Image: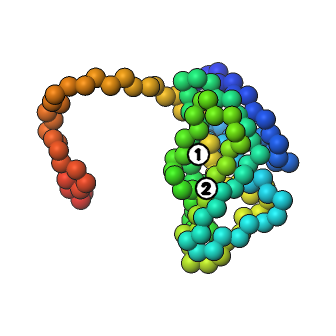
Amino acid sequence: MSDKPIQVSIVNKSNNPLPDYATSGSSGVDIRAHLEHPVTLLPSERTLIPTGLFVAIPRGYEIQIRPRSGLAIKQGITCLNTPGTIDADYRGEIKVILINLSTEAQTIQPGDRIAQMVLQKIEQLQWQAVETLDTTERGTGGFGSTGKV
């Protein structure tokens, strides 16, 4: 992490505090549900949860939405499309796709911490069309090709 944090403009239309780092070593900030009423997810059900947050991400960066480990282990709730990418030119509300992977109904309360946001530096690629690729020791070995251990 750099000594000087990257400035990101944010509009908070929720009653929740601005996302903040839980500890000095945290890489993500927890974001909270912006709900008028609790939302109950049945087993295997998914829904889109609003946060009330709108951000202006600097060019050359993205924000990734990632699951919270505590929510996953304690309630079986995780994020779909993980990590979710918020592009630098998006200005809409940040919403999180949650799914209940447990065998019981789970309820999200207004203000619950539902996911974490991580700011990531990105680089855009430029394709170079070629006829063949260089060879490597692995070659075309895919899923499981490097062994179990």
Rendered image quadrant of residue 44: bottom right
Compared with 60, 24 (above or below) is below
Q: Position of residue 34 (x, y in %)?
A: 78, 53
Residue depicted at x 80% and y 40%: 12
Residue depicted at x 61% and y 78%: 104
| Mark 2, residue position | 97
Residue depicted at x 77% and y 63%: 109
The amino acid type, in three-letter code, at marker 2 is Ile
**Element assignment for label 2:** strand
Compared with 53, 147 (above or below) is below
Give the position of the N terminus as an image quadrant: top right
| Mark 1, residue position | 65
**Element assignment for label 1:** strand
Q: Position of residue 107 (x, y in %)?
A: 71, 69
Residue 56 seen in render: yes
Rendered image quadrant of residue 136: top left
Name of the residue lying farthest toward the bottom: 104
